[in-house]
Image (spheres, rainbow, N blue to C red):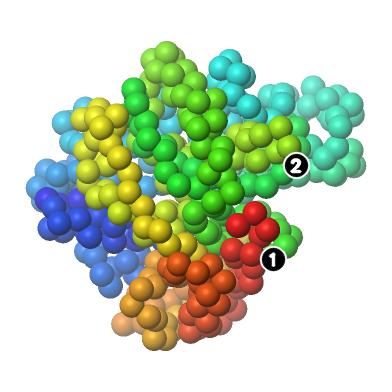
């Protein structure tokens, strides 16, 4: 069968590689993909939903897998399914679990899912009044989609006043920041887990851990993610509790609301002294977590997608490799702020059991050039975690482009 993967990042590259590993898949096509993915898979530019549906029909595509949140929140799955095209991902309404933080928080409150206390504000003056009485630090979150950058931690009233002006008066996050969620600051350590859901039943994955801040020691601004490791053994003991107290009520709540969640539900957690609490939900695979989860997954991804589509997730049993995986992101100088583009990328000799996943990359006149903030990520696997960390960083040193930025402590947090 032929699979079409939608998206342009390293996550989509990892998805394409995993689909291509299925005996049942003859061809994987990525849209739009990028210059690095195009070295391995056909990449096509499809400008809108209609063009995607036409391409699916005229090329005998059996299944469309949607990588990023943006088309999901605009209703791509509803659009394709209305034309009897098999598309994996949530509907527009179900994607609200990511596209509106206020929606996600209200749902969690209703079903008593453990999460940080919060208030939602649509006007500046009531938010201003609230922050005067707040217990600091507080967490400001833009309600809408902000590419993983819409969260700011404020440590004092002065900082909060400044941020509030930027969020609500200067519209730093555009329409996404028109509504503001102000949340209690949770103390603990972070991990994440995915659930494959068919709307009725779900099955959860191993845990992984992203490294959101730009700099080692969790310093600097938040990014889309600078690297990941899996599995997180220390989180395993919470798995049943997370399934029972988080995934089960949230998925039940969405079904009761009339828009069951189908696809991949990402749950970002803080493991606090009181147990796991939800930091965020995403309506899709995480990036860079996918680049460590999929290489460890032994189960055929086509089988998982079919179980989601045919509502047979209850019959699904996931199988995992026993190894650890680390992904280290190489970013462009300036990221997550304004960054440089057009730097020549050279990739040295990478061992066979490691893989470069391309993200912000284009190919011009036979040369790979940087073209985005997160340029690429490299994933390695090993049974020995210390050895894996050494190996991963020696491989990163074989990737050259001017201004390359990496975090030097992926996989080194104490909980791992
Ligand atoms: P999010 O985009 O919601 O995942 O938030 C980005 C990052 O901000 C998270 O990965 C956490 O490191 C941090 N964060 C978000 N919410 C909270 C919270 N309530 N307490 C502490 N840290 C948080
Ligand atoms: N790595 C976090 C995310 O994909 O949103």
- In the displayed structure, 391 sits above or below 7; it is below
Badge 1: residue crowd in 10 Å (few <14, some 14–19, many ≥20): some
Label 2 lies in ligand 1 vicinity (Cβ under 8 Å):
yes
Where on the image, by quarter, is ligand 1? top right
Question: SS class of the residue under badge 1?
Answer: loop
Query: What residue does disc 2 label?
Result: 187
| Residue 256: quarter of image | top left
Which residue corresponds to the image point at 42% horizontal and 38% vertical from the top-left? 204
Badge 2: residue crowd in 10 Å (few <14, some 14–19, many ≥20): few
Measuring from the top left, give residue 229's x and y in whole percent. Answer: 52, 59
Which residue corresponds to the image point at 69% horizontal and 66% vertical from the top-left? 216
Of residue 15 and residue 404, the one placed in the foreground of this image is 15
- In the displayed structure, 317 sits above or below 258; it is below
Is the residue under label 2 in contact with that under label 1 (CB below 8 Å)?
no
Measured Cα–Cα span from mark 1 to mark 2: 19 Å
The disc at residue 216 is 1
């Amino acid at each position: 069968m032929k699979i079409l993967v939608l998206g342009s990042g390293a996550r989509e590259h990892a998805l394409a590689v995993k689909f291509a590993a299925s005996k049942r898949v003859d061809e994987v096509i990525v849209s739009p993909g990028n210059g690095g993915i195009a070295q391995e898979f056909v990449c096509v530019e499809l400008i809108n939903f209609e063009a995607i549906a036409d391409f699916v029909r005229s090329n005998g595509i059996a299944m469309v897998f949607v990588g990023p949140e943006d088309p999901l929140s605009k209703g791509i799955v509803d659009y394709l399914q209305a034309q009897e095209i098999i598309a994996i991902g949530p509907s527009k309404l179900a994607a609200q679990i990511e596209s509106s933080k206020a929606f996600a928080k209200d749902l969690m409150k209703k079903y008593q899912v453990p999460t940080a206390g919060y208030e939602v504000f649509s006007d500046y003056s009531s938010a201003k009044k609230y922050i005067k009485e707040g217990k600091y630090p507080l967490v400001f979150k833009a309600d809408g989609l902000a590419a993983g950058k819409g969260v700011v931690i404020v440590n004092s009233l002065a900082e909060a006043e400044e941020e509030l002006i930027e969020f609500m008066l200067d519209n730093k996050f555009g329409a996404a920041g028109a509504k503001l969620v102000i949340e209690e600051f949770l103390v603990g350590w972070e991990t994440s887990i995915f659930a494959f859901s068919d709307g009725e039943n779900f099955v959860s994955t191993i845990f992984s851990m992203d490294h959101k801040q730009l700099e080692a020691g969790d310093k600097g601004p938040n990014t889309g993610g600078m690297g990941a490791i899996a599995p997180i053994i220390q989180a395993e003991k919470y798995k049943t509790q997370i399934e029972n107290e988080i995934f089960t009520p949230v998925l039940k709540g969405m079904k009761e609301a009339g828009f069951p969640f189908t696809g991949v539900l990402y749950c970002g957690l803080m493991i606090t002294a009181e147990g796991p609490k939800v930091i965020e939900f995403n309506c899709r695979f995480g990036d860079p977590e996918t680049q460590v989860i999929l290489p460890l997954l032994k189960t055929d991804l086509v089988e998982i997608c079919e179980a989601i589509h045919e509502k047979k997730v209850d019959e699904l049993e996931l199988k995992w490799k026993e190894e650890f995986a680390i992904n280290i992101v190489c970013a462009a100088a300036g990221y997550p702020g304004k960054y440089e583009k057009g730097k020549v990328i050279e990739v040295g000799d990478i061992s066979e059991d490691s893989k470069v996943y391309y993200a912000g990359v284009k190919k011009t006149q036979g040369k790979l050039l940087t073209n985005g903030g997160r340029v690429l990520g490299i994933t390695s696997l090993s049974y020995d975690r210390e050895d894996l960390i050494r190996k991963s960083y020696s491989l990163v040193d074989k990737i050259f482009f001017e201004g390359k930025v990496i975090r030097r402590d992926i996989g080194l947090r104490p909980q791992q």
